Amino acid sequence: MRRLLAAATALSLSTIGCVKEISSEERLDRETQYATAKDTPDAATLARLNCSDTDEPLNQARNVNRPETDRVMSYIDLYTSLMKRTATFEEAMTRNPDLHYTEGSQQFVAAKETCIQQTADVRVEFETYVRELVDVPTVQEIKGGNTVTVARLDFNTLRQAIDTLALDDKESLVNRVGNAEKKVSPVTSDEPPAAASGKKRGK
């Protein structure tokens, strides 16, 4: 009788142990879900986000008196920032639907829509400028009595802009930049190239 009782107890404990045991994949899934929930932006984080503060950086990007390399970097920084803010709103409100019904939810929805619109507007302006630069990436200058071809801006920065926009014809645009780069005359004096200086250049 004692042997039967001991065997039954051992079998019961073994069964319980099997029920509690989870695979490494299941454990990873649980940890991932916990980390995802913990990393999801909350209402307090969203309340600090807005996309209505673009006037100053946009003015810097539009300033024709600045070197074109700097202008392109301003567009890159602004557009990237707007995309991140928009993605934060979308991620938070997708992962946590309750944000649609909490106090101040209308503020979040309105702020998200503003970010989407601002991102779209800046993208159109940014892309227009980048395509203009790809179309006319160099200018002619007189140096030492000779006409030489110089870059309007740093070509790597232009490639970065094309990559940031993720354009459908990205490969074609990058190839055109590469071809233009081959035509640039080597710098033969202390005069900085158009890409680095802030001077207005004639074509």
Image (cartoon, helix red, strand yellow):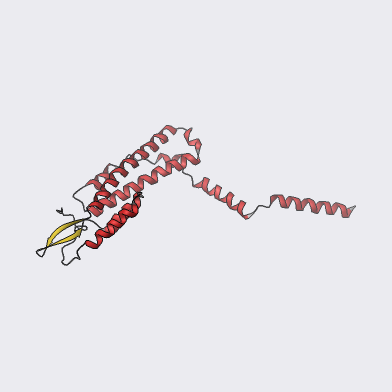
| Residue that lies at the very extreme toward the right in this rendered image | 1
The x and y percentages for residue 32 are 55, 50
The x and y percentages for residue 82 are 35, 44
Residue 10, image quadrant:
bottom right
Total marks placed: 0
Residue 62 visible within the image: yes
Give the residue displayed 41% in from the left and 39% down from the top: 47
| Residue that lies at the very extreme toward the bottom in this rendered image | 188
Closer-to-camera residue (168/109)? 168
Residue 57 visible within the image: no
Closer-to-camera residue (141/180)? 180
| Residue that lies at the very extreme toward the left in this rendered image | 145
Give the residue displayed 32% in from the left and 44% down from the top: 123
Closer-to-camera residue (3/94)? 94
Give the residue displayed 69% in from the left and 50% down from the top: 20
The x and y percentages for residue 27 are 61, 52
Residue 130 vertical placement versus 110 (above, below): below
The x and y percentages for residue 168 are 36, 49
13 with respect to 88 (left or right): right
Closer-to-camera residue (178/69)? 178
Residue 46, image quadrant:
top left
2 with respect to 46 (left or right): right
Give the residue displayed 46% in from the left and 41% down from the top: 92
